[in-house]
Image: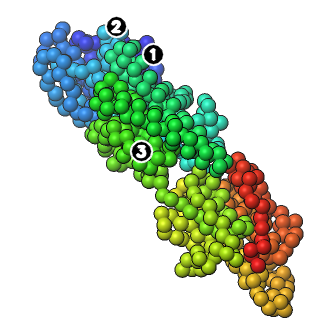
Amino acid sequence: MDSFQKVYKTVFVDESQIEEELAKVCEEIEIDNELIDICRQVESAIINQSSQHDKESLQTSCLLENPTNQPQQIGGAMKRSSYDIDSPKAKRIKVIEGASTSSDINLTDNGKVMCDVCQRLKMPKIVLHYFTFKGLGEGARMLLTYGGQEFEDHRIKRDTEWDAIKPTTPFGQVPILEIDGKKYAQSLAICRYLGRKFGLAGDSMEDEMEIDQNMDFFKEIWSKGDAIFYEADPEVRAKLQADHEKNFYPRMWQKLDDIIAKNNGHMALGKLTWGDFLFAGMHDNNKRICMIPDLYEKYPNLKRVYENVAAIPKVKAYIDASPKNDFSGKMPKIVLHNYTFKGLGEGPRMLLIYFGQEYEERRLRADVDWDNIRPTFRQAPILEVDGKRYVQPLAICRYLARKYGLRGDSMEDEMEIDQNMDFFREIYSKAEDVFYETDPELRAKLQADLEADFYPRMWQKLDETIAKNNGHMALGRLTWGDFVFAGMYDYNKRICMIPDLYEKYPNLKRVYEKVAAIPKIKTYLNTSPKNDFKSML
């Protein structure tokens, strides 16, 4: 706005002119009365101070406290006096006498100076949208922190928010940098923009091209890794990974390691650039996405980039205070042991697939394998994590949901999922007792009793609960409980000995249908072995 650039001069102006010009600007940008008063008080203080100096040579600006609190001297002596104002919208205002840095005084094209109180009101609203973990969006977070740019860090919950946000993005992807409501995508484009804004893009067009070439080379590596990591077919994924570990990764990572060594631990130009921030932000994710746990042991110069960025005081403070990464970089060896049929172990299987967690599948044959594998609790499924074994399907699924984010947003949400799943467990536990009863007459009597009262009452209540939750087990949305129930879809009818279970209680079927419609799960169901209940008997 033109009038914004007419407010303050580098030479003395009388107070009445300041009042007049300030009133015009404040009216145009709708500043409230409190900030109008702040600006007037500060300008009065400037005029009072300037009477002590040669008004023609004085450059003065009122400004909010510099984040570093250490403006550099450009020329001549610098003298600082304080002018404190208590305000919820202005913490501390400084009046700087003498020459000031370009970041402290806002010169316009025609040599005028803008009050920094007004300048900050005019600053764009910045929002960075990315998932809760550190990956392609972390470099932008660190660049904004490094540049001292205030921004809203919107960490998207993948299980509860992403489906609604995705259609609002330019390409259905994150990170997104939102500037005054306009959204920009692509991690390299965002970091390149921030690099230019904060002076980290080199000193010439050739410098910019060198950064771009090295970062595009890095992108070529992680794009390949990303495609393999999210491949839904386990056999195809394993084949592609083996090929890349043999022919692609050693060549590409070694070349990048050599480039970083040549550039003194940086991605380009032998000094700090925006490329370092993008790479450092993906420090943990590089190992995970390429499925190379010892990546930084094999190529030690890669780690130097992260160390150089993490040593910057502002960035170090951010890293220390920011949420820990969901993807720690340590990739535990996961083994799931369960019977060949689909039952209590199918929920954990589908959760592991849904979250993209690599795991080894060991399907147990009760007549051959079980006696050799039984853990302390003498039960399956068994989730083995780095050699330690855990049992109980609800405990396993709850753990996976906590690890990857499908457990709700609060302790109360978690309790609601638990109560509904414990209610469901009460049904199938009763059913198992009857199903495995060896006395035929007693089995028939117990089954008749359950069909007379227990099953109609309990299944009807669960059917109503699912209807209330829009076809889910709890919270009206996808949770780990849906995977447990869907995994037991065939098992429920068999264990309760009610062939028309889903005709009687149709909302039960909705849970399975919602889970089975998830692309990764649909692919798994289409390729997995058909259910075989022979080993149940």
Circle 1: residue type: Met
Circle 3: element type: helix
Residue under the point 34% across and 7% down:
110
Residue appearing at x 47%, y 28% in the figure: 217
Q: Are marks 2 and 3 in contact (CB under 8 Å)?
A: no
Marked residue nearer the N-terminal end (3 or 1): 1
The residue labelled by disc 3 is 295
The residue tagged 1 is 1
Q: Secondary structure at mark 2?
A: loop
Quadrant (top left/top right/bottom left/bottom right) for the C terminus: bottom right
Instruction: Give the mark nearest the N terminus, 2 or 3.
Output: 2
Q: Position of residue 465 (x, y in %)?
A: 73, 66
Q: Quadrant of residue 498?
A: bottom right
Q: Is residue 72 above or below residue 337?
A: above
Side (left or right) of 452 relative to 236: right
Mark 2: few/some/many CA within 10 Å (<14, 14-19, 20+): few
Q: Nearer the viewer, mark 3 or mark 1?
A: 3
Query: Which residue does the image show at 35% across and 26% down from the upper left?
Result: 268
Residue at 58% across, 59% down:
360
The residue furthest front is 246
Give the image location of residue 295, x and y in percent.
Answer: 41, 44
Circle 3 residues within 10 Å: few <14, some 14–19, many ≥20: some
Residue 455 on image: x %, y %:
80, 78
Any part of residue 197 in sight: no
| Residue 336: quarter of image | bottom right
